[in-house]
Amino acid sequence: MELVLRSTRVVTPEGTRAASVAVSGGTIVSVDAYDTPVPDGVRVEDLGDDVLLPGLVDTHVHVNDPGRTEWEGFWTATRAAAAGGITTLVDMPLNSLPPTTTVDNLRTKQDVARGKAHIDVGFWGGALPDNVADLKPLHDAGVYGFKCFLSPSGVDEFPELDQDQLAASMAEITGFGGLLIVHAEDPHELEAAPHTSGPKYADYLRTRPRISEDTAIEGLIAVAKRIGARIHVLHLSSSDALPLIAAAKREGVKVTVETCPHYLTLTAEEVPDGASEFKCCPPIREAGNQDLLWEALADGTIDCVVTDHSPSTAELKTDDFATAWGGISGLQLSLPAVWTEARKRGYGLEDVVRWMSTRTAQLVGLDRKGAIEAGRDADFAVLAPDETFTVDPAELHHRNRVTAYAGKTLSGVVKSTWLRGERILHGGEFTEPAGRLLERNN
Ligand SMILES: [Zn+2]
């Protein structure tokens, strides 16, 4: 071994305890008693009472690089992620140009990310109406699964699937054992909803009602059940969909579900007029809806929490909710935001780790990530859970310092972040990029 990290509070799969974590060659080799003697010449990092967590795994990030790098890029996104205790992200296939919908496009994205990644980066592929023949080659090239939309995505180069195309893509992906991840809002329900514009959040909320999610998810589950597919529902906001998801899980449908920090920590009631930094699709809903999302996380109906970090330039965040870009930047703040609310509701850091690291790693099959135990990568976040800070946009590493969390006081300060046994962030300073480009089964 070459390194031992010692803390009175190490979050392990068996619970939180005082421990010494031994690292060799970037891998955790053992988790021992706190006072286990360390051989001469081995570096010891004593973290005191700061908590040692497994690095978070964020499987829903829009890096937008290349093509829309004025929105975000691999350099800035991975620095922001590291500052937030995230050590692995999986990049969404859209909002970059090209989108990740062919093997050539995947290689283009990997070439751009190489040398800029401060943390490990994997890629999702995209399922479009006309690229069924590209799905298997993309799977073989190492993407972790395929994203599709059922309603317009917001960018022309990434069209949605109709029901026939959904079934065709799902059957193809199921044929090679892949995973389909779905932005589930029903286009007909969105069409039937009021079409408002202007600065009032309540008006915007009516344009994307809960039933648009509920209907889409109900249909999606029916198709998945018929085909025997493995599906994942992205960014669930509507609590009304929870009973049908719970029922599908009971029936053995292979469905998993994520939600996001903004649905768990922000409410429709608090959004000021014109504050489109709060706009995302599906939208942030009412406080009562949020309570039910927390209950669903606790009982396992919702599996995990991811950022859906989807930034844009400040100019696209106009004060008209109808035309402003929909997307919330959350990479750097997701851990403190979720932890602040989780502790208020009586949950522990073990729960946060399960939702934001262990289960997300499982979702994409990253069996070297997501827990502090022997044989896994020595990826860590060191957190002072009781220290607080007030969110100052100037301190964000996102390319555009636009945030729905400005001025909020949050608990949980990330003291350092470690990737394969190297401290990549400490005292606000980053090392040179040491992230790897991950491919499925590598
Ligand atoms: Zn997204």
Image (cartoon, helix red, strand yellow):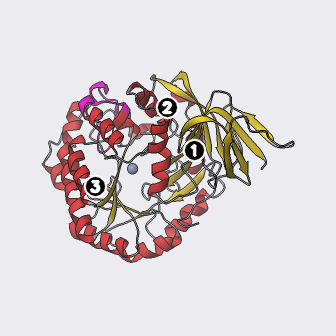
Q: Is residue 114 above or below residue 201?
A: below
Q: Which residue is mark 3?
A: 249
> What residue is disc 2 on?
336
How many circles with numbers are drawn on the protein?
3
Identify the residue shown where x is 40% and y is 28%: 346
Q: Residue at x 29, y 34 (%)?
A: 290
Q: Residue 222 at what x, y percent from top left?
A: 20, 62
- Across and down, in percent, residue 166 comes to 27, 67
The answer to whether 220 is drawn above or below residue 135 in the figure is above
Q: CA distance from mark 3 to mark 2?
A: 30 Å
Q: Circle 1 is placed at which residue position? A: 55
Q: Amino acid at mark 1?
A: Gly
Identify the amino acid type marked 2: Pro
Distance from label 3 to label 1 (Cα)? 28 Å
Q: Main secondary structure of the magenta part?
A: loop
Residue 436 locus on image (x, y percent) = 63, 57
> For the residues carrying marks 2 and 1, which lies nearer the camera in this image?
1
* Residue at 20% across, 49% down: 214
Q: Quadrant of residue 81?
A: top right
Of all residues, the one furthest to the left in this rendering is 192
The reply to whether the magenta stretch includes residue 284 is yes
Q: Residue furthest right?
A: 40
Q: Is 319 covered by the magenta stretch?
A: no
Give the answer, above or below, for where 230 lies relative to 352: below
Mark found first going from the N terminus, 3 or 1: 1
Q: Is residue 200 visible?
A: no
Say whether residue 377 is visible.
yes
Amino acid type at mark 3: Lys
Q: Nearer the viewer, residue 43 or 124?
A: 43
Placement of 51 over or under 407, stated as above or below: below
- CB under 8 Å between discs 3 and 1: no
